[in-house]
Image (cartoon, rainbow, N blue to C red):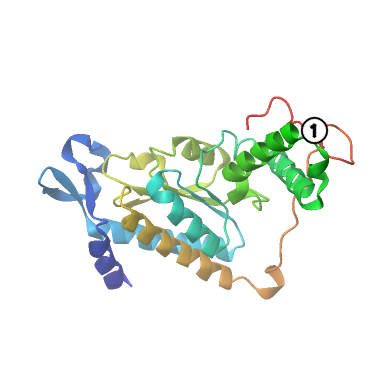
Amino acid sequence: MAEIVVKDILDAGVHFGHRTSRWNPKMRPYIYGRRNLIHIIDIKETVRGLLRARKYLQKVAADGSLVLFCGTKRQAAEGIQECAEAAKMPYVTERWLGGTLTNFRTVRSRLKRLEELESLEESGELATYSKKMQSTLMREKKKIFRNLNGIRHMNRMPEAVIVVDPGKEKNCVQEARNVGAKIIALIDTDSDPDVVDLPIPGNDDSIRSIELVLSKLAEAVSLGKKAIPPEQAGPRPRPQQPPQANGQGGAPNPRPPAGVDQ
């Protein structure tokens, strides 16, 4: 596998770092040299990081645990979504909402709200509201869907979080550390490797580089899931939902609950 990865790394330009003026001295062990004022990442370290991360993720997936994919920068968003969906794992590609991991109950309440709004639309009950209210509810639904759709089936804390550029995703990294989730990250020469558990040194600005690394990690997750015994492979129960914002059953409240950032 190492030879195949090395060839793919060279083709995708994973070894190209940032300008030498932007480097983080902590990345020195992962840098091979410099060329035209650009740092060149040591391919051996990239392969070593990938193999280590793949081995760990395969074990995590085989245990039936969740792996959260996170990458909100433009170059990473599409690759994050594709690889996470292929591995059937949750993902975040839009703005990281504060409390996604540390205040999970509130996030679940927003997802409950999304289900209510979708139910309104599918049942046709939305048509009974005024056009102004319909427009307001659809804007709310679109915003919640955009921010939280990737984690709508995340019914428990992830065991590991895959991050593209921990500097960009510092809020995600901090929350993952707070809840004890292991952090696997694609880190460039301007990153701080100390904030992650399993660093994979590589170009985190190139779409081809990001997608190559993510595909290798998602492949390991998928392999691990195949090792789950059939009797444990069924869907896991979802946690009990918090009470509705209006404190009653029946028709959902058309207004968003107060005090929650949308």
Q: Which residue is at the far top? A: 259
In this rendered view, identify the residue nearer to me: 145 or 99: 145
Relative side of 62 to 204, left or right: right
Relative side of 59 to 40, left or right: right
User: From where the camera sits, is residue 185 visible?
Assistant: no
Q: Residue at x 23, y 37 (%)?
A: 25
Q: Which x, y percent locates residue 136?
A: 69, 34
Name the quadrant of the C terminus: top right
* Location of mark 1 (residue): 245
Q: Residue at x 69, y 36 (%)?
A: 135
Name the quadrant of the N terminus: bottom left
In this rendered view, identify the residue nearer to me: 115 or 151: 115
Relative side of 228 to 48, left or right: right
Q: Residue at x 56, y 36 (%)?
A: 97
User: From where the camera sits, is residue 131 visible?
Assistant: yes
Reply above or below: 144 against 239.
above
Q: Which x, y percent locates residue 223?
A: 51, 70
Q: Which residue is at the far front? A: 131
